[in-house]
Image: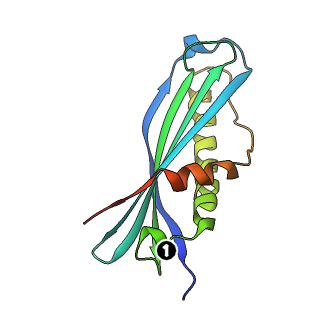
Amino acid sequence: METASFQLKDYQFTRVELHKANLKSTDLGLSFDVSGQFSKINGVSNFQLTFETIAQSKGAEDDFLHIVCVANFVFENVSTQEEIPDFFYTNSVAILFPYVRAYVSLLTSQAQVRPLVLPTLNLTHLSEPLKANTTTKSE
């Protein structure tokens, strides 16, 4: 069996909400949600990763920041969802997170609030939820 390879094709931010009034302190709680959709269209294997980031001031009820980023990956040597190697689920999140992190910094600095720089995080714990929340879209 050949080794599966993949590359990030493109990404876009499909939801961006910034509520300055909900920023009560710089002590923020972060949460992430991930899901995926595998498809094979015209012989090309694609994986759409949806990466949701929510930031909330500690002690606040409402979100300060809510961003959804959708990334498209293209596979070589993968024909079904079952053939996706486990390392993809970890690496795809690690590949996308720096783009989300940079976007959050840019967005908050342009919104004239104190720029928010998300910390460098180890998000390997998201690989299992991503794998569990991945579906296959039929042609």
Q: Residue furthest bottom?
A: 1
The percent position of residue 73, horizontal first and vertical second, equals: 47, 63
- Please report the residue visible at 60 percent of the width from the left and 20 percent of the height from the top: 112
Identify the residue at image location x=59%, y=38%: 32
Instruction: Say which of 59 and 70 sits in front.
Output: 59
Residue 8 pos. (x, y %): 51, 63
Residue 93 vs 23, above or below: the answer is: below
Residue 16 in sight:
yes
The residue that label 1 is drawn on is 83
Residue drawn at (75%, 44%) of the image: 120
Secondary structure at numbered mark 1: helix
Nearer to me, 17 or 90: 90
Point out the image quarter for the N terminus: bottom right
User: Quarter-wise, where is residue 59 in the image?
Assistant: top right
How would you rate the neighbour count of disc 1 (Cα within 10 Å): few for under 14, some for 14-19, many for 20 or more? few
Q: Amino acid at mark 1?
A: Glu
Quarter of the picture containing the C terminus is bottom left
Disc tally is 1
Image position of 68 with respect to 72: above or below? above
Report which quarter residue 134 is drawn in: bottom left
Location of residue 60 with respect to 103 vertically, above or below: above
On the question of residue 115 being in view, the answer is no
Name the spot of residue 97 as percent of width and height, x first. Answer: 62, 48
Is 118 on the left or on the right of 35, as rendered? right
Taking 95 as reference, is 81 above or below it?
below
